[in-house]
């Protein structure tokens, strides 16, 4: 196993970090990784605080 993975495994075992599943629709960075329908895109952009809700289409 690569050193970087062993390092992460150790941090998890020491309870310094943890991982949790996040539903795709709750991942606010999605507009930065793929095309989304306008409604989903606008919701993500609003949650990121990039633009005022009043300016969304």
Image (cartoon, helix red, strand yellow):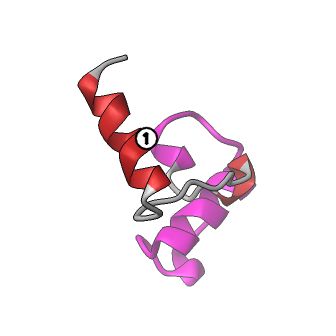
Q: What main secondary structure does the magenta stretch of the protein show?
A: helix
Quarter the C terminus occupies: bottom right
Residue 49 part of the magenta-drawn span? yes
Q: Is residue 15 left or right of residue 3?
A: right
Tell me where residue 13 appears, x and y as whole percent.
48, 52
Residue 25 part of the magenta-drawn span? no
Residue closest to the eye, 29 or 42? 29
Residue on which disc 1 sits: 9
Q: Is residue 10 left or right of residue 35?
A: left
Q: Residue at x 65, y 41 (%)?
A: 36
Residue closest to the eye, 52 or 31? 31
Residue closest to the eye, 54 or 31? 31
10 Å crowding of disc 1: few (<14), some (14-19), many (20+)? some
Q: Residue at x 42, y 59 (%)?
A: 14
Q: Residue most toward the left?
A: 3
Q: Residue at x 68, y 59 (%)?
A: 26
Q: Is residue 4 left or right of residue 53?
A: left
Is residue 53 placed above or below 6 in the rendered structure? below
Tell me where residue 38 appears, x and y as whole percent.
68, 51
Quarter the N terminus occupies: top left
Find residue 49 and report its image quarter: bottom left
Is residue 44 placed above or below 23 in the rendered structure? below
Q: Secondary structure at mark 1?
A: helix
Q: Which residues are magenta?
A: 30-57
Is residue 21 placed above or below 5 in the rendered structure? below
Q: Residue at x 58, y 69 (%)?
A: 56
Find residue 8 and report its image quarter: top left
Q: Residue most toward the top?
A: 1
Tell me where residue 55 appears, x and y as whole percent.
53, 75
Q: Is residue 21 left or right of residue 8?
A: right
């Amino acid at each position: 196993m690569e050193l970087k993975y062993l390092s992460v495994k150790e941090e998890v075992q020491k309870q310094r970090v943890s991982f949790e599943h996040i539903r795709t629709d709750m991942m606010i960075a999605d507009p930065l990784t793929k095309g989304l329908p306008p409604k989903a895109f606008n919701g993500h952009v609003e949650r990121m605080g990039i633009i005022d809700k009043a300016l969304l289409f």
